[in-house]
Amino acid sequence: MIFTGHLLTKAAGMLISGIAGAAVVDRFKQPGNGNIARRGAVTVTTWGLKGKRRIETGAENVRLSAGDIVAEARERVGEQAPPPAEPVNPHDHEH
C-alpha cells in the first residue's frame, strides 16, 4: 500500500511536470509573446508546485494512517510495535 502511494506520487509529479513543460514550450513557440510567455510559464510552474505539494501531503497522510493501522493490529495480537527509529531486524555486522 505504501509502495503504491509512492508510485502514484511520483507518477503525478511527472504528469504535472510534463503538462507544465508542454505549456511552456507552446507559449514560447508563439511569436511576439516574450513577456506574456514568461508570466504564463511562471504561473504554470506555480500550479505544478502547488499540485505536487498537495499530492505529497496526501501520500504522507496515507503513509501515517497505514502505520497507525499496523501498530493497532500489532497491539491487538499482543506484539509491541518497535519505535520508528529502530529497525525490526537490526544488522549487527559490517558490510
Image (spheres, helix red, strand yellow):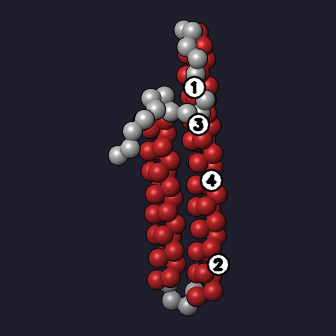
What kind of residue is marked 3? Ala
Seen in the image, is 49 located left or right of residue 92?
right
| Residue type highlighted by circle 4 | Arg
The disc at residue 85 is 3
C-alpha gap between disc 2 and disc 3: 45 Å
Circle nearer the viewer, 1 or 4? 1
Secondary structure of the residue carrying tag 3 is loop
Q: Secondary structure at mark 4?
A: helix
- Residue beneath label 1, please? 82
Comes first in the chain, label 2 or label 1 = 2
Residue 39 numbered mark, or none: 2
- The mark lying in front, picked from 3 and 4, is 3
Question: Given the image, on which type of amino acid does mark 2 rest?
Answer: Arg
Query: Crowdedness of circle 1 by 10 Å Cα count: few (<14), some, many (20+)?
Result: few
Going from N to C along the chain, the mark reached first, 2 or 3, is 2
State yes or no: discs 2 and 4 in contact (Cβ < 8 Å).
no
Q: Is residue 72 above or below residue 56?
A: above
Whether 93 is drawn above or below 50: the answer is: above
Write down the quadrant of residue 89 in the picture.
Answer: top left
- Amino acid carrying mark 1 in the image: Pro
Q: Secondary structure at mark 1?
A: loop
Disc 2 is placed on an element classified as helix
